Image (tube, rainbow, N blue to C red):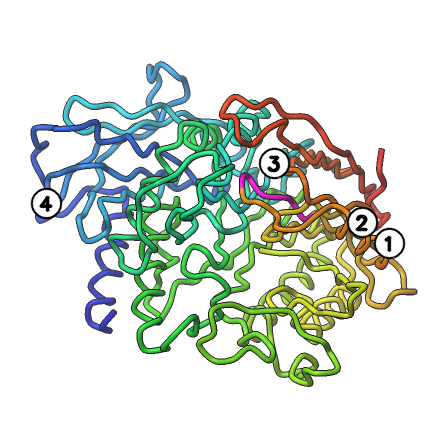
Amino acid sequence: MHPEQRRAFLRQAASAATAAALPRWAWASPPALQQYPFALGIASGDPTPDGVVLWTRLLTDHPGPHTVRWELAHDSRFARIVQKGEATALPDLGHGVHVELRGLEPGRWYHYRFMLGDAVSAMGRTRTAPAADDLPERLRIAWASCQRWEHGHYAAWRHVAADQPDLVLFLGDYIYEYATPKATEGLARTHALRLATTLADYRDRYALHKSDPALQAAHAACPWAVTWDDHEVQNDYAADAGRGDAAAFLPLRNAAWQAFYENMPLRAATLADRSAPQIYRRLRWGQLAHIHLLDSRQYRSWQACRAPGSASASGVRAADCAELADPARSFLGHAQEQWLDAGLAHDAAASTRWSVLAQQTLFAPRRYPSGMVATDSWDGYPAARARLLQSLARHTPRNTVLLGGDIHQNYVCELRAQPESPVLASEFCGTSISSRSGTTQDKVDAIARHNPHVLLARCDERGYGLADITPARWTTQLRVLDDPLRADSGARTLARFVVEDGRAGPVRT
């Protein structure tokens, strides 16, 4: 995107997100509706003690802007309206709507909806975070990632909504950029979209995923906080480089980034006047939890020993790839590393009960019996991982838990600076909503035997993680589907682990 075009885009996004009165240029009469405009659902996100973001994206054949009405109420009948207003759905933003609410009460639930003409959206529930000095009795978080359309139905999201979390953390791969495989045997469903390369392609891909009713129900159930991984853009991309020619990749990446913003309940500050969106940020849940939501794609170093422009990153042998050990290489980028280090120092000084690092993939090392090293995960950035472990050891937050996704497998791990050193933190890496793991349980069992810090490793289940957090303990349930090929699949708890306040490391119960 040309710099002047980007500045205009940022101005439009900031103006459209303001909950105040709209400028006259943004007014639009309701068109004659040819289709239900809220077919992609509604959502809310990034709660603070006094506010939250409300989102929808219109499906419309009308090319101009639309004036969308919204309401926030204490009750589901909307008899006790708290706030209401109008927002602009601009074609340049894909007719996405972002309403940033302020002035709400801390620590309470609300109901919201959107209206265009005579059309009324589904009702959503959202909530604010507790006051900064409050120590709430409980926080329930669901976290998930990786929802390739063809590989399974989204039954997991129906169960997430039934679990009634306070917050959903989505850790990447909300969409997959691929076309449907030519061989369709064993797939849950297919689609007719091509490989995504343009803004229109990515908008269509989000529309496909968001058409799923179970996913819509989970978005309507509570606020979300989202980050991305690679498939929102292109498999295994790193910073400003991906498959093929770099000059061709950058317009593709920028289009994908814009579509991500258009389709997520993000604040306009995400698009502050800079060269790229800032997705990493912090969410505070009173004194109970401080969530550091990370971005391990935008700033990472190119994968070690990967040829420029190659299709994907592959495993290497450490002895054949000296680049792996280069201390200058970073997984988060050095600015984000420093930001996270400062946040962990603040958590320790403030005696925050639970420091949560919500990020894309498995953090703990996986030493393969074959001696191979995966280069697209933290294993491919050992110096960067060592720096983060040193930060934890230096600051010693009261309790630290890492959440991850990406690998389409459930892993539960103890995190140590060295194999024989004390446990510093606990890790729960969740499996996918639908995406296949691409490995076998026999191979995963062999890895677990080779890595004593791995307490559980399963590749054969799809689902999500559910955490109940209190001042005294963190309880994780690994929730898995009976059959991801069925939209009505049941779910069960594969395993339950507890982390006690002041005692690092998960314990199976």
Upstream in sequence: badge 4 or badge 1 = 4
Most common SS among magenta residues: loop
| Percent of width and height locating residue 164 | 56, 26
Query: Which label sits on residue 64?
Result: 4
Say the numbered circle drawn on residue 449.
1
Q: Which residue is mark 2?
A: 445
Q: Residues within 10 Å of mark 2 (few under 14, many from 20)?
A: some
Q: Is residue 437 above or below residue 83?
A: below
Name the kind of residue labelled 3 in the image: Gly
Circle nearer the viewer, 4 or 2 = 2
- The residue that disc 3 covers is 463
Q: Secondary structure at mark 3?
A: strand
Amino acid under disc 1? Arg
Highlighted magenta segment, given as a residue range: 429-434
Image depth: mark 4 or mark 1 in front: 1
x, y (%) of residue 415?
79, 58
Q: Are marks 4 and 2 in contact (CB under 8 Å)?
A: no
Distance, label 2 to label 3, CA atoms, is 19 Å
Q: Earlier in the sequence, mark 4 or mark 2?
A: 4
Determine whether label 2 and label 1 are within 8 Å by CB. Answer: yes
Quadrant of the snapshot with the C terminus: top right
Query: Measured from the top left, where is residue 107 in percent x and y?
Result: 54, 33
Report the Cα–Cα distance between label 4 and label 3.
40 Å
Residue at position x 72%, y 37% in the image: 476
Residue type at mark 4: give it.
Answer: Gly
Residue 492 found in image quarter: top right
The image quadrant where one finds the N terminus is bottom left
Q: Position of residue 166 (x, y in %)?
A: 56, 33
Choose between 268 and 322: the one closer to the eye.
Answer: 322
Q: Is residue 399 visible?
A: no
- Give the crowd class for mark 1: few <14, some 14-19, many >=20 residues within 10 Å: some
